[in-house]
């Protein structure tokens, strides 16, 4: 499996209502676990990001 690069965009600000980073749309736990996560876990997180970003943009 190909390595999955972090979705971090260096905009690290937490939306406390949704518990998501406004830059990458990951949770604090996901951000912390990214470097040790399996490729399958990273792929699952990446698959969730478009919906999370849409939710964040709706406010």
Image: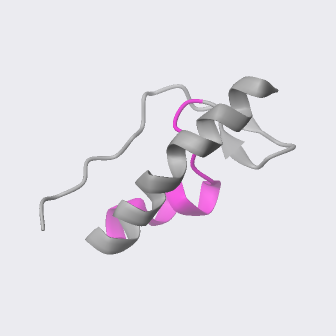
Q: Position of residue 40 (x, y in %)?
A: 32, 73
34 is within the stretch colored magenta: yes
Image coordinates of residue 4 in percent, x first then y, are 24, 54
Q: Is residue 25 visible?
A: no
Above or below: residue 21 compared with residue 48: above
The reply to whether residue 9 is in sight is yes
Magenta span includes 25: yes
Q: Which residues are magenta?
A: 23-38
Residue at (47, 59) in percent of width and height: 45
Q: Residue at x 71, y 32 (%)?
A: 56
Nearer the observer, 25 or 47 = 47
Residue 17 in percent (x, y) is at: 87, 43
- Residue closest to the eye, 9 or 41: 41
Q: Quadrant of the N terminus?
A: bottom left
The quarter of the image holding the C terminus is top right
Question: Is the residue 30 above or below the residue 25 in the image?
Answer: below
Q: How many marks?
A: 0
| Residue found at x 54% / y 25% | 11
Question: How is the model colour-coded?
Answer: one colour
Q: Is residue 43 above or below residue 54?
A: below
| Residue at the image position 83 percent from the left and 42 percent from the top | 16
Residue 22's quadrant in the figure?
top right
* Left or right: where 45 falls relative to 56: left
Q: Outermost residue toward the left?
A: 2
Which quadrant would residue 57 be assigned to in this image?
Answer: top right
Is 23 positioned to the left or the right of 54 in the image? Answer: left
Q: Residue furthest right?
A: 17
């Amino acid at each position: 499996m190909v390595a999955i690069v972090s979705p971090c965009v260096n905009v690290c600000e937490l939306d406390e209502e949704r518990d998501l980073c406004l830059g990458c749309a990951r949770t604090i736990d996901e951000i912390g676990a990214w470097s040790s996560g399996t490729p399958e876990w990273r792929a699952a997180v990446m698959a969730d990001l478009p919906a999370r970003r849409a939710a964040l943009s709706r406010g």
